[in-house]
Amino acid sequence: MGRKFVVGGNWKMNGDKNQINEIVNNLKKGPLDENVEVIIGVPAIYLAYVKSIVPDSIAVAAQNCWKVPKGAFTGEISPAMLKDVGINWVILGHSERRSIFGEKDELVAEKVAHALESGLKVIACIGETLEEREAGKTEEVVFRQTKALLSAIGDKWANVVLAYEPVWAIGTGKTASPQQAQEVHSSLRNWLSTNASPDVANAVRIQYGGSVTAANAKELAACSDIDGFLVGGASLKPEFVDIINATK
Ligand code: PGA
């Protein structure tokens, strides 16, 4: 189907200049599979620095941004500011933003809409909690979260990557099994076929995220509807190179 594999690293609130230099040097050394798109999600204060030291083949993403271009929003940064310092991607709707900072579907959608309008590309995150999964609500939650994004995305699907990240798998060491992940990716693609369009469903890349490591990446990457990863903890480690190369 020709969906280019896309691996994101989400550093979250980690790293200092020394560690960042090490991570970037490791990525430069690679070697990285040239058929894989690589995007690293960097704390806001280091975005410009990282952009200045990574090769152009590695994209840099913010981990959040606000929903208007400028104004009295103390502490926030806008897509326009990101573009101004050469950043072309943003991660939005991460479960930590949703749960710790109280971001609801509607706010995530407004942020996605404004980021896309401003010319950013977006990694939009969705995923159920353990409680929701155990209550048999995985699809309901994932479809609800995605539905909220439909009108925000409009005809800009080419600039969106979806990241399915079951909350119970994030930072817990409990990866979804390839079967569990594939099942959600495939039903999400079917849902998109009906609710967006068959073309969107075929073309959109759906990353899996949640305790991805070099040890489990290959098996997950072999699933037909898994088009990449969003990697937290392991993106700070040398094994991130092996995760990028998981389809080799
Ligand atoms: P993890 O985080 O790989 O540390 O589980 C994934 C994420 O939150 O994107």
Image (cartoon, helix red, strand yellow):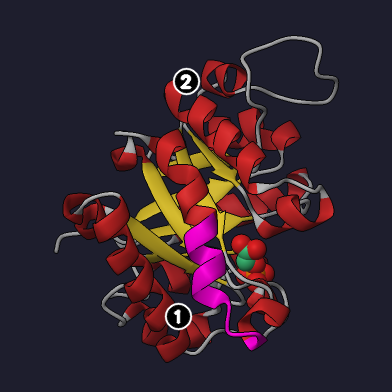
Quadrant containing the C terminus is bottom left
Q: Look at the image and tell me whether residue 52 can be seen.
A: yes
Label 2 sits on a secondary structure element that is loop
Q: In which quarter of the image is residue 190?
A: bottom left
The residue most toward the top is 71
Q: Provide the residue span drawn in magenta.
A: 134-144
Which quarter of the figure has residue 34?
bottom left
As for residue 70 lying within the magenta part, the answer is: no
Q: Position of residue 196 (x, y in %)?
A: 29, 49
Q: In this view, does 92 lie to the left or right of 20?
A: left
Quarter the N terminus occupies: bottom left
Task: Say the numbered circle drawn on residue 88.
Answer: none
Answer with left or right where residue 230 lies relative to residue 55. right
Q: Mark 2 points at which residue?
A: 118
Residue pictured at 53% horizontal, 58% vertical: 144
Total marks shown come to 2
Q: Is residue 19 above or below residue 210?
A: above
Above or below residue 18? Residue 224 is below
Amino acid bearing label 1: Ala
Q: Distance between the residues labelled 1 and 2?
A: 32 Å
* Predominant secondary structure, magenta span: helix
Please give the name of the residue rendered at 77% of the width and 54% of the height, measured from the top-left corner.
Answer: 14
Residue toward you, 26 or 225: 225
Of pointers 1 and 2, the one earlier in the residue sequence: 2
In what quadrant does ligand 1 lie? Answer: bottom right
The answer to whether the residues at label 1 and label 2 have Cβ atoms under 8 Å apart is no
* Type of amino acid under label 2: Ser
Marker disc for residue 181:
1
